[in-house]
Amino acid sequence: MSLNLAMILKENAVRIPNKTAVICDEQRIDYRDLDRQINRLANTLVSLGVKRGQAVTLMLPNIPEFVVAYFAIVKIGAICVPINTLYKEREIEYILSDSESVAFIACSGFLKDAVLAFELCQGCKNLIVVPFPKVETLPAIEGVHAYQDVVAAAPETCDLVMTDADDIAALVYTSGTTGKPKGAMLTHFNLFFQAFVLPFIHWEPGQNDEVALATLPLFHSFGQSCVMNARLARGSTISLLPAYDPVRVMEIIQRDKVTHFAGVPTMYLQILNHPELGKYDLTSLRECVSGGAPIPIDTLERWKQTFGMEIREGYGLTETSPVATFNFPGKDTVYGSCGERIWGCDVKIVDPQGNTLPPGKDGEVVMRGVNIMKGYYKNQEATDAVIKDGWFASGDQGRLDENGYLYIVGRIKDMILRGGYNVYPREIEELLFEHPAVHECAVFGIPDDEMGEEVKASVFLKPDRTATAEELKQFCKDRIAPYKYPRIVEILSTPLPKGPSGKILKRELRQMHIDAQQKKS
């Protein structure tokens, strides 16, 4: 079956040519112009020798050129490899080499590391530099081109390459928490399916004024599928924010009358706790979606109390394109749950031996369906380790209730084994969020000679509140079983470390603790 993800832009250029597709500050691009820009870059890539099935790495923030480049690459049947804009030379070079990229599109703001990585990668022949945030003087190196120069003379029309549905459209690298990052092969069908069948994509009469705010990084599968692809497939407008900032988020919601907002839990918390929240009109919002990490129930309740609307939580991973479950519109949100399985995706809970567990029992979340990746690029061993008989093993600990709603307890590797008892960090984090002084928190295990692992909580307080470590420890001790409460509570003077999508990086907190202990000894 022939299918190309870029068909969604091609069709909209004909169906709604004058509709605004992309907003970025003062820049507005309609679907006709967006299609023309995509075609120019697609023709440029072809002229530089990029062929169907070859990889092109993309290192851009949320700017119009990301959308243009992503769909230009896909349109010619090449493979888009979007990477973290925080990466440095060594990390960039690894992905350029591992993905066998033949071309690289990057911002002038990342020029130094981009050029160093480009020079190290023998197979990458061309580096196209996008002038953001400003035009830089490009080094006199063979294969380095200024974006504005190479696309200026390119034709505005370009034939869509009719790829097979099972061809790779995007190679999205996982965060690499257990070794080097692995490239999840997402096919045209994986991504096309997500764009059209995500449960929160529901077209209602009179609702074609949709504006979605894209502050989640588009190089991440959440922002890529759930905001960019899904909203553009629907013919909506997306407003791009290159770097997350809660004030800018509120300003843009007010300015562009944003109707749909997708974020990670920390984003919602920062908006709720921001002292300037009352200055902005956010009443245009109709739908808010959370993913990337479990959202505290306290945050859900406060958001509904403040705005009179639910945050709908979903669940998935890069390898599931990414959505697997969701709290569907038209149904009451089940707090603490990330919803039911989406159409075409089966979800079950298994024990360590792979036996299916009944409702209410904790185990590993496994999934199969049309949203599951093709596998890890050039890594059959890693693919076989997570996909068995068509079921993808998530590495997440969870349970299903009698109605099929999924509850995530945490990463299996995050589970703390304290003196023979299983301690699930999320339960303690939910409790800490009930304390009025807690702004952010993370619970994780640290090595302990006596217990094997001990429970530690890192906490960042609200600016107008105070609490001591002992107070927070006692708060937990009074409310949960003795083996669960954190024996160590550390109050940090700065916000907790986060990854590009806003997830709290527990591995960094754990390493900070280990480093501090080593210094003491």
Image (cartoon, rainbow, N blue to C red):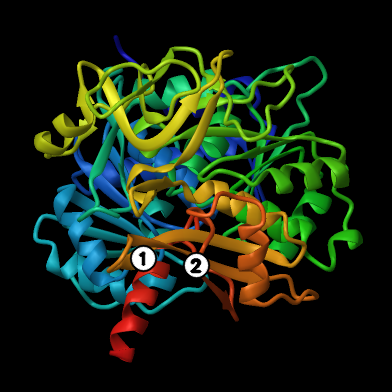
Identified at 70% across, 17% down, the residue is: 203
The mark found on residue 289 in the picture is: none
**Residue at numbered disc 1:** 446
Looking at the image, is mark 2 or mark 1 earlier in the sequence?
Answer: 1
Where in the figure is residue 214, as x and y percent of width and height? 61, 47
Q: Nearer the viewer, residue 407 or 9?
A: 407
- Vertical position of residue 164 compared to residue 1: above or below: below
SS for dot 2: loop
Mark 1, other Cα within 10 Å: few <14 / some 14–19 / many ≥20 = some
- Vertical position of residue 371 compared to residue 427: above or below: above
The mark found on residue 487 in the picture is: 2
Q: Is residue 345 left or right of residue 27?
A: left
Q: Is residue 203 left or right of residue 343?
A: right
Asked which quadrant contains residue 156, the reply is: top left
Outermost residue toward the top?
1
Q: Amino acid at mark 2?
A: Arg
Q: Is residue 93 left or right of residue 88?
A: left
Identified at 49% across, 44% down, the residue is: 67
Quadrant where the C terminus lies? bottom left
- Vertical position of residue 388 compared to residue 397: above or below: above
Q: Are marks 2 and 1 in contact (CB under 8 Å)?
A: no
